[in-house]
Image (tube, grey):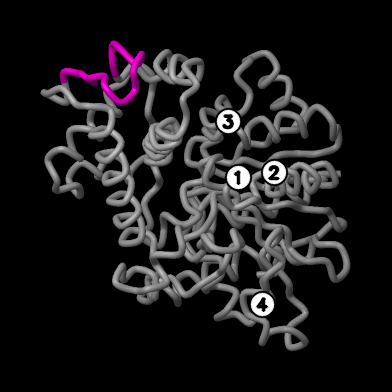
Amino acid sequence: MNYPVMRPKRIVTFLGAGASVPFGYPTTKSFLEKLDTYTTAADEKKLLNSIRNMGRIVEDVEHVVEILDLILELDATSEKGRLSAFLHEYPLTVDFAKKHEMEIHQPSLDEKLQWRQLVELARRLRNTIERLTFQQYESKVDQYSKIEKEYERFFSVLMPYKLGDEAFEVFTTNYDNVIEDYCRRSGILCTLSVLDRDINPNAMGKSSRRLFLTKLHGSLDWVIDRENKGIEVVTTQTFINKDSTRWERNEYVLFGTKPRLEKAGIYGRLFDHLLQSLLKAEVCITVGFSFRDEHITKVLNDTLSQNRSIKIIVVSRSPKETSKNLIRESTRLNKLFKERRIIPLRCSFGTPKAIKEINESLSSLK
């Protein structure tokens, strides 16, 4: 079907978990809900449930990993102020005065633990979550044809709107390689921004279609080389085997936690690139993104204040509810709805309705 196009627009596309769910990948929230059944070690299961039962809301697996990373990070510090701040937000114990002598007690742990025991348990649980993440998010060969079909439909709608020969600008919080798999199979030149790495260099010169991909939460196939601190993009399957000698000198860049991305030296550059791209954009299309990541939400809020011409199209099964995570103040949100600066589309990725409504929304923007 041919769709009417009124004029080119600079479009930024933002893909959340909902853009991968149709291909059998879980959201980070649904992954957390099942994690208890995947985790077999009793003490790891207890720590996981202890974290989930904290006073503050722990909504997804990334939040669990963030807390585990904080425990491991605090193990390397002697700053009592940081320990007190951690305790205030994450009440795991009654006494952090002497880190290596204290005991941690919480009802869901059913026992007292020395700090060193907690650190080792946190490290084991984090490694378990990492291993399970690979099992859940690695490429699904049986979904290749469906991925190619659905993303081809999606990007075909956007293609007439891009300016000249510039690349599609795509941001994602997903660790999976769905976009990369699509580009390889469709002959699209895909470049990883910030890392400045071509996913399929053989497509160079053979295709007029180019995609610029920014993975804000890291990727299943990124590792930090412990020797030179640089990021290497690898074939995921070769690193699942922990018997590999390369495993010992690398660690995965996953989950989008600030400490891990900062260790990789790319946290600031990833989010600066997001902000700069949005400031130049006329339209941002978000697909299946919950706006629960406070770092990304802040960038989007800053953009709405600084770029008065940008429109955000929210594609979701519950777009108005989802938008409340982006704009907490109801009066401002309703104003943005009325001005059509935030445009809610109630539909799911990979459906004809989504394709139709995205195109109609783009065509209606003057």
In the picture of the structure, the residue carrying the numbered disc 1 is: 262
- Whether the residues at callouts 2 and 3 have beta carbons within 8 Å, the answer is no
Q: Quadrant of residue 284?
A: top right
- Which stretch is magenta? 93-107
Q: Which part of the image, by quadrant, shows the C terminus?
A: top right
Q: Viewer-proximal residue, 267 or 183? A: 267
Gap in Å between the C-alphas at discs 4 and 2?
28 Å
In the picture of the structure, the residue carrying the numbered disc 2 is: 268
Q: How many marks?
A: 4
Q: Residues within 10 Å of mark 1 (few under 14, many from 20)?
A: few
| Residue 171 covered by magenta stretch | no
Assign a secondary structure to mark 3.
helix
Look at discs 2 and 1 and give the one toward the viewer: 1
Residue 244 visible somewhere in the drawing: yes
In the picture of the structure, the residue carrying the numbered disc 4 is: 188
Between discs 4 and 3, the one toward the N terminus = 4
Q: Residues within 10 Å of mark 4 (few under 14, many from 20)?
A: many
Look at discs 4 and 2 and give the one toward the viewer: 2
Q: In terms of secondary structure, what is the magenta stretch mainly? A: loop
- Whether the residues at callouts 3 and 1 have beta carbons within 8 Å, the answer is no
Give the percent coordinates (x, y) of residue 208: 77, 79
Question: Which amino acid type is marked by label 1?
Answer: Glu
Look at discs 4 and 3 and give the one toward the viewer: 3
Gap in Å between the C-alphas at discs 2 and 1?
8 Å
Q: Is residue 362 above or below residue 295?
A: below
